[in-house]
Image (spheres, rainbow, N blue to C red):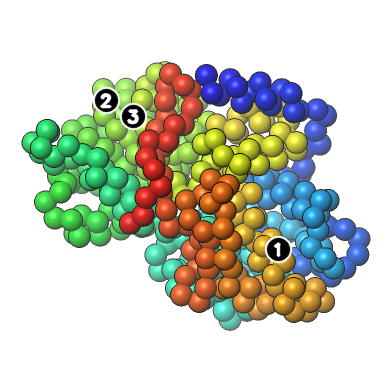
Amino acid sequence: MRCRLFKAVIMLVLGLVVVLPLVGCADGGDTGTQLVIGYQGDLTGPGGSAMMPIHSAIQDYLKTVEAENPIPGLKLKIVTYDTRSDYSRVPLGYTWLKGQGAEVILFPSPADIDIVSKKLAEDQIPGFGTTALEQQRDNQWAFFIFETMEVQNAACMQWIMDNWDYSGEDRNPKVGSMGWIGLSTTIGMQDGIDAFLEENPGKFEWMGEEFAPLGTTAWAIEAKALMDCDYIFVGTVGTGSASFIKEVRLRGYDKAIIGPTAPIPGYWGLIESVVAALAELYDVYHLHNMPWCIDCSFADEWRGLMTENRSQDWVEGEIRQSGYATGPAWMTLLVEVIRNAVEEVGAENIDGSAVRDAAASINLDLTGDGWGNPWVLNDENHICCNTYKVFEWDVDEDWWVEISDWFTM
């Protein structure tokens, strides 16, 4: 099995490893100007199991940059604030990071950058996110690797529509969704579904959305209501996703479970630990902008970074999910932006405005590394990836397999 091959490679690569601190600073060399990069995300709350690996990967990636290809005249310092997925902590964290001298802030959660979005231009601090909510698409001080939550779910719907056998089944696909009330991930993804249904009348039988209070892990009512679906969209994170998948399979649901980047692949280890039997994880799909689990040079890069910096036990758990892989993707963009800013204004003049301007003029072609489109950012486009690929969990292979080519909306 493919996963076993990865484990064999890990055993060969791993030696004695120093595990970096969970939070704190990742400094560069001893000379040059310092650029403080703030990181504001969940490390100990409900989203922590997916966010902690991202934070670890960021530190590992920047450590490697400082050691092997430093930015001339500049050292990078990471300062971290743990939001615990508590929205009330987000403004406090932003203010604290600004007080620490942050010129750039990283936001792994689309909700967090949305909450403080108006402050970015006011303080001339560019925000870099993994994914966004649609209302941040035109924010001139925010830049993202992955498409918005709304568009990702619309792309899932597009894939279902394109692959459904309307003549053979002699009916439309039955689709429903679940989520947590008040969670921005749920809201954004549902908005994407609703817009797609409106734009494609007569193509789906909508079975409704079943939303429960934030933090719910008992899904008897919601699972029962969605039992007749052909596809159930998961709109939670962490324990919400894991407990729902367990519940709906225990109740006999034998059709498809689907979601975009946030609900499933980053929490796969948790999902596997919660379901009653791993054999029940058939027909589980996720859509991603990132070629994180296919055979390509980007996948080799993030796995190599992990094995060089993390313990064997840690690697064997995290290699099966997408959180850590997000770090190198994200930092590839940020480091390129900062290099360009330094070339333009000089390391001694680097600030948030210079980083923002450099981000708005990036043209980085990583298609040879496995990505689906060149990353082109400008004043009209602040999102790198606009191509999608669908992955399915193969129970027999014990790994994610790609079941679509790259496609666009």
Q: Nearer the viewer, mark 3 or mark 2?
A: 3
Residue at the spot of label 2: 254
Q: CA distance from mark 3 to mark 2?
A: 8 Å
Q: Is residue 375 visible?
A: yes
Q: Amino acid at mark 3?
A: Asp
Q: Amino acid at mark 2?
A: Asp
Checking the image for residue 37, the label placed there is 1
Residue at image location 44% in from the left, 32% down from the top: 401
Q: Nearer the viewer, mark 1 or mark 3?
A: 3
Residue at the spot of label 3: 283
Residue at image location 47% in from the left, 70% down from the top: 381
Image quadrant occupied by the C terminus:
bottom left
Residue 106 in percent (x, y) is at 62, 60
Residue 282 in percent (x, y) is at 36, 25
Q: CA distance from mark 2 to mark 1?
A: 46 Å
Residue 276 in percent (x, y) is at 41, 20
Helix, strand or loop at mark 1 = strand
Q: Amino acid at mark 1?
A: Ile
Mark 1, Cα crowd under 10 Å, few <14 / some 14-19 / many 20+, is: many
Q: CA distance from mark 1 to mark 3?
A: 40 Å
Q: How many marks?
A: 3
Q: Is residue 281 left or right of residue 123?
A: left
Which callout, 2 or 1, points at the residue further toward the start of the chain?
Answer: 1
Instruction: In this rendered view, identify the residue nearer to me: 9 or 213.
Output: 9
